[in-house]
Image: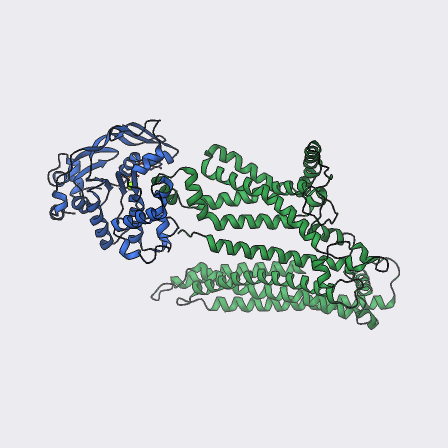
Chain colours: A green, B blue
């Protein structure tokens, strides 16, 4: 069905474009004075847009709407208790759909057969309605575009406005998605803290200031002390500790290699080194996790052994160092780009005053490139905070409240993953805790971004 | 352009004053190659101290190339190779033992497009003295900055906003800021590559006036496409064509009585 719809749409759009531009060419040849306001191609594009937009909208709105209508029509025959029982409702719907597709095994009840029939007829009626409506609107757009072709008609300007609308729509979708995600996480978070039907939920203070993290306890609500199940502090310190180590590793390495590549390296070295750095960015984090657990952690343990320190086989240091390696390419590649974007004239100005290369870089190039470098760091930090796999493999799951980089720690994302693995239902305090964690994580990165923006605004040196 | 305008322009007093005695810059058999391209061919010239020398010639003839040899800015271009000898005060500036950074402090440069640093006006001028340790104290530095801005004729316009960004000035002000920046390190030679090409006539007049004052203490070399400008401000003029130095002499002689046919053709506007 959607195949036919989109084929028809493509045909109409192409036809609209082709016929309209042809006609525009024809109009321009007519004897009367004056030439076409817009090139024929714009008349074509204008008609095509008039066909494309309504047809796409009809489908985008109609298809999900039809699904809902069909579902409730199919379930109408069943007892109304289904409406409140999510689990049962889903199973019944699956049966109805299977039966309608002739994939139902066993003997269906009469009720089920009726429901399947209703589903089929509703769907087919609905699909034809969508098709009819879409094609009708498409043709109307076609007619409107085609008939408005005229010497004076400003198809070029109209199409410009269409482009503007498309761009605006894309930006809106991006923003709405963000807002939607934030709100859905916020909603579950509020449930986690305030839903009275939830057993073992913590108070906000318990969560934000608790120093013990042990979500399994919430499942055994009768045995454990619920108050200490969801203390968020050890996760935050674990996350910040690993991120800090990662930035301490990647910051200098990434920035200095960017400076070397953009200011000192010969073109030969650059052509060879830059791709290698970018390959580093392409290594899957699972592989880096192996590397952390099997190579880096033992080395660190060996060093520790020699200086008489007893280091756990899983340590924040190992995870942080490898995570630092993961984010080096972000910092180096982006910083390299912004350093290259600093105009040569600024360098010449400094050299002509007798500045050395490193003075020029420190006093002129880096300040001018600062906003870009800070965004590179922010991107890298966000990646580090969001990274899960390396921590799982190298830093462990133990929620220790510690600032000692040689201990095992855990992070927010790792706990989200641990909580959710194997669970489908978001109805216990344990699983909903994941949303609360997600929300706080989002908040932490937001604060970091605001700080970074403030830094940029304070220290930026704008060149033009 | 016709001869009468040139001659008219020449009658300003600065053009007629005699060049000072000593020779500041000496080039002998200077060649520059950009990769395979031979951009400057066998240039030999003496540039007198405390006067203004103008380089003229059609686009692409190697004026900027030669200018950049004098403070070794060509070193920053990977493909560029310089042969021959250039001396300042008898010292070979391509001698491997010579410190380029110090050379550039002695030979300042002002570029065609104003390129102030994206820092405050004060910091722009203070930058050179800072890196060379010229000022001993904050008040010394203040004094250097103020006097440089004064000499560049910019002080009156900016004295209330020394902490505003240098990039916020008008084009003409920016160019004078760049001149102030260059003279703040007290160079002996100032190279100017078409310093007025982005400026309006009023700003141009200010810069020319400034050069006329500066020539009492500095050796100035200016590349220009405006023959009126060359005639107005310079005491000596060198004409380049296709990488060759065709003719060099007193500005008056070059504009009134050139020895070479090519010079004659160029200044009368027959080509270029
Ligand atoms: N960085 C470079 N790489 C390669 N060739 C260059 C480079 N700079 C200049 N050239 C070449 O050297 C020749 C002389 O250039 P130069 O910039 O000295 O000319 P110019 O006399 O200053 O011209 P204009 O008046 O247009 O500024 C030109 O042919 C130019 O193409
Ligand atoms: Mg030039």
How many circles with numbers are drawn on the protein?
0
Q: Nearer the viewer, residue B38 or A405?
A: A405
Query: Residue A402 location in percent, x, y?
Result: 70, 48
**Residue A216 seen from this side:** yes
Horizontally, residue B155 falls left or right of residue A442, namely left
Query: Residue A323 location in percent, x, y?
Result: 64, 43
Q: Nearer the viewer, residue B134 or B261?
A: B134
Kindly identify the residue that appears in the image at 76 percent across and 65 percent down. A120
Above or below residue B254? Residue A144 is below
Q: Nearer the viewer, residue B44 or A82?
A: B44
Horizontally, residue A310 falls left or right of residue A225, namely left
* Quarter of the image that includes the N terminus of chain A: bottom right
Above or below residue B7? Residue A173 is below
Query: Residue B83 location in percent, x, y?
Result: 31, 27
Give the image quarter of residue A286.
Answer: top right
**Residue A425 seen from this side:** no
Query: Residue B46 location in percent, x, y?
Result: 20, 32
Quadrant where ligand 2 appears: top left
Q: Nearer the viewer, residue B5 or A439?
A: A439
């Amino acid at each position: 069905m959607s195949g036919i719809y989109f084929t028809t749409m493509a045909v109409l759009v192409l036809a609209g474009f082709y016929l309209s531009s042809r006609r525009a060419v024809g109009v321009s040849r007519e004897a009367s004075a004056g030439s076409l306001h817009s090139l024929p191609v714009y008349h074509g594009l204008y008609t095509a847009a008039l066909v494309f937009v309504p047809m796409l909208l009809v489908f985008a709105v109609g298809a999900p709407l039809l699904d809902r209508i069909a579902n409730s029509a199919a379930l109408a025959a069943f007892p109304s208790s289904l409406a409140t029982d999510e689990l049962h409702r889903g199973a019944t719907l699956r049966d109805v759909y299977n039966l309608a597709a002739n994939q139902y095994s066993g003997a269906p009840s009469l009720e089920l057969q009726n429901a399947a029939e209703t589903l089929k007829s509703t769907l087919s009626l609905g699909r034809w309605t969508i098709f009819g409506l879409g094609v009708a609107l498409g043709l109307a757009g076609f007619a409107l575009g085609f008939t408005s072709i005229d010497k004076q008609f400003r198809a070029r300007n109209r199409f410009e406005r269409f482009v503007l609308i498309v761009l605006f729509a894309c930006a809106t979708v991006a923003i709405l998605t963000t807002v939607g995600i934030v709100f859905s996480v916020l909603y579950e978070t509020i449930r986690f803290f305030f839903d009275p039907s939830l057993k073992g939920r913590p108070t906000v203070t318990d969560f934000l200031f608790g120093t013990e993290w042990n979500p399994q306890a919430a499942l055994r609500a009768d045995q454990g002390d619920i108050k200490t199940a969801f203390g968020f502090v050890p996760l935050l310190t674990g996350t910040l500790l690993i991120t800090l180590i990662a930035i301490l590793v990647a910051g200098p390495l990434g920035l200095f290699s960017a400076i070397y590549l953009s200011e000192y390296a010969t073109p030969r070295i650059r052509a060879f080194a830059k791709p290698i750095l970018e390959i580093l960015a392409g290594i899957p984090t699972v592989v880096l996790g192996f590397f952390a657990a099997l190579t880096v952690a033992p080395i660190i343990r060996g060093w520790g052994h020699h200086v008489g320190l007893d280091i756990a086989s899983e340590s924040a240091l190992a995870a942080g160092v490898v995570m630092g390696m993961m984010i080096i390419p972000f910092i180096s590649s982006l910083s390299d780009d912004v350093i290259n974007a600093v105009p040569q004239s600024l360098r010449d100005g400094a050299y002509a005053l007798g500045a050395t290369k490193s003075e020029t870089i420190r006093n002129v190039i880096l300040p001018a490139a600062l906003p870009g470098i800070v965004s590179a760091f922010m991107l890298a930090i966000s990646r580090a905070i969001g990274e899960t796999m390396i921590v799982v493999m190298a830093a462990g799951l133990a929620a220790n409240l510690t600032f000692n980089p040689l201990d095992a720690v855990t992070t927010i994302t790792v706990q989200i993953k641990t909580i959710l693995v194997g669970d489908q239902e978001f109805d216990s305090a344990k699983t909903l805790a994941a949303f609360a964690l997600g929300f706080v994580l989002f908040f932490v990165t937001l604060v970091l971004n605001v700080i970074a923006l403030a830094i940029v605004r304070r220290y930026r040196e704008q060149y033009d | 352009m016709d001869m009468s305008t040139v001659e008219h322009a020449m009658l300003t007093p600065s053009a007629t004053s005699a060049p000072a005695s000593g020779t500041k810059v000496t080039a002998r058999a200077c060649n520059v190659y950009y990769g395979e391209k031979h951009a400057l061919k066998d240039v030999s010239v003496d540039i007198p101290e405390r006067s203004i020398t103008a380089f003229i010639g059609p686009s692409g003839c190697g004026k900027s190339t030669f200018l950049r040899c004098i403070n070794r800015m060509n070193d920053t271009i990977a493909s560029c190779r310089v042969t021959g000898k250039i001396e300042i005060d008898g010292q070979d500036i391509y001698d491997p033992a010579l410190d380029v950074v110090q050379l550039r402090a002695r030979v300042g440069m002002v570029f065609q497009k104003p390129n102030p640093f994206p820092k405050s006006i004060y910091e722009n001028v203070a930058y050179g003295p800072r890196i060379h340790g010229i000022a001993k104290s904050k008040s010394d530095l203040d004094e250097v900055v103020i006097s440089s801005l004064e000499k560049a004729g910019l002080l009156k316009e900016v004295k209330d906003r020394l902490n505003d960004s240098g990039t916020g000035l008008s084009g003409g002000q920016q160019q004078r800021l760049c001149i102030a920046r260059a003279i703040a390190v007290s160079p002996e030679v100032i190279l100017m590559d078409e310093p007025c090409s982005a400026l309006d006539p009023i700003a141009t007049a200010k810069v020319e006036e400034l050069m006329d004052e500066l020539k009492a203490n500095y050796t100035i070399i200016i590349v220009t496409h405006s023959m009126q400008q060359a005639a107005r401000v310079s005491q000596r003029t060198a004409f380049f064509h296709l990488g060759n130095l065709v003719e060099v002499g007193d500005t008056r002689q070059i504009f009134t009585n050139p020895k070479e046919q090519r010079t004659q053709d160029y200044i009368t506007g027959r080509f270029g």
